[in-house]
Structure formats: structure tokens, C-alpha cells
Image: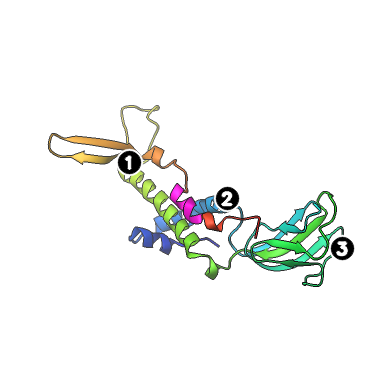
Amino acid sequence: MALCSVSDVEQFLQVDLNSTVEASVTNTFIPYVDSAIKRFLGYDVERATFTETFDGSEQQDLFLRHIPIASITNVIEDSNTLVSGNEKDYVHYDNGRLRRIVVRWSGIKPKNISVTYVGGYQAADIPQVIKQTSAKAAARMLMVSLQIASKADSGQVGSHLADNTASSSFDIPITERIGDYDIAYADVVIQNLTPVLTQGDMLILNPFKSRFFV
């Protein structure tokens, strides 16, 4: 499941993409952007089943990574299966917090606590902010690529080192003046290598980052 669709990208661009470009958006741009968003947030956004293993820490709280938490399948501590409930062994919160009741989690032992749970958003519940940020970033990458493609010569683009008698016009004008002709060019190749998520994107996504506190 992707965080956005080709239709979302087209809404940002306000253009109708042909099938070839749509395939590139679906198979390349959106997955790449979604991967960057997940890395920034610190968890997988889509609903799925996850298993995490923790070291015993003698603390009362553990924090699961993939939020929001939909349900806990099982919690095993020192080979013992714990029971959920306010008067049982543990309770969980949507934001990933897993609290031990009355006692603390077991002593400091490596990988002695295992938690299997269902976390993340269902497709219909993915926050619009995340969805639209994915579409905007994918649209931005696509536009730069299309700019490069529009400036290239017809046929295959070869290395200038191999044949410097032919070249592709990869220059994009960013300023232009007709009187006393004055023009400045941008390096679109370098532009295309800039970070996938801008500072503005990360600022918008920041409230959804994994937080290890309540």
C-alpha cells in the first residue's frame, strides 16, 4: 500500500499524465518518497503485524515502534505469556506505550521480551498531511525529471566524455531578460539530487514522528 496515488500527484500538478509517466510515478517516485517518509517518521505507516524484541530493563514502560497500535496479539516475558488488562499483566496505548501493571518489566536480560502486535494506519485512515506530503514530494521529483527529459536531444543520451561533438541541452533558464539579452541557467541535474524531503516537508511531518513518551 502506498501513502498516495498517481491521482494525488496529478492533483498537485494539475495535469493528466500519460500511462508511461503514470507507471514511473507508481513504480519509482512514490515508493522512493514513501521510503524517505517512513525513515523520517521512524516507523512503517501502513497497518501490518509486527514483532519486536526487547531487553529486560526493569522499567515500567516499553515503547512499540509502529504506531498507532491497533491491538496486541501476545506479549511473552521470560517464556511466560502475559495477559492484557488493567488488573492483569499489562495495558497498551495507541501511541505505542506498553505498561506493566504493578510490577516492572523483568531484570536486565538480553532479548527476553517479545511483543507481537498490529500497528499503523489503515489505508482510509492515513492522515491527509502524510498523504499529501508524499504526493507533493513525488510531484516535485517528477517535474524535475520531466524538465531534464524535455531538454534532452532525441534518442539515447550518451556521455560527453565519449563524444564531445554532441551534447544534450540540460540547461534550464531560471531568469531571462529580453532587452540587452540576459539569462541565467540552473543545473537541473544537481537539483534532482537534492534531498527527497524538504525542510518544509519535515516540519509538516514532525508531529507524526515516533515519540517515546506519553
Could you give the CA–CA distance between mark 1 and mark 3, rounded to whole angstroms? 64 Å
Q: Is residue 89 left or right of residue 167?
A: right
Q: Are marks 2 and 3 in contact (CB under 8 Å)?
A: no
Residue that numbered label 3 is attached to: 80
Q: Earlier in the sequence, mark 1 or mark 3?
A: 3
Question: Is residue 201 shown in magenta?
Answer: yes
Q: Describe the colour scheme in one phrase.
A: rainbow
Residue at the spot x=61%, y=63% of the render?
Answer: 120
Residue that numbered label 2 is attached to: 39
Residue at the spot x=77%, y=72% of the render?
Answer: 86
Amino acid type at circle 2 is Arg
Of badges 1 and 2, the one in the foreground is 2
Could you give the CA–CA distance between mark 2 and mark 3, rounded to whole angstroms? 33 Å
Q: Which residues are magenta?
A: 199-205
SS class, disc 1: loop
Give the vertical position of 149 relative to 30 (above or below).
Answer: above
Question: Is residue 118 shown in magenta?
Answer: no
Amino acid type at circle 1 is Ala
Q: Within 10 angstroms of label 1, few (less than 14), some, or many (20 or more) residues?
A: some
Residue that numbered label 1 is attached to: 152
Residue at the spot x=32%, y=38% of the render?
Answer: 186
Q: Earlier in the sequence, mark 2 or mark 3?
A: 2
- Direction front: furthest residue: 102
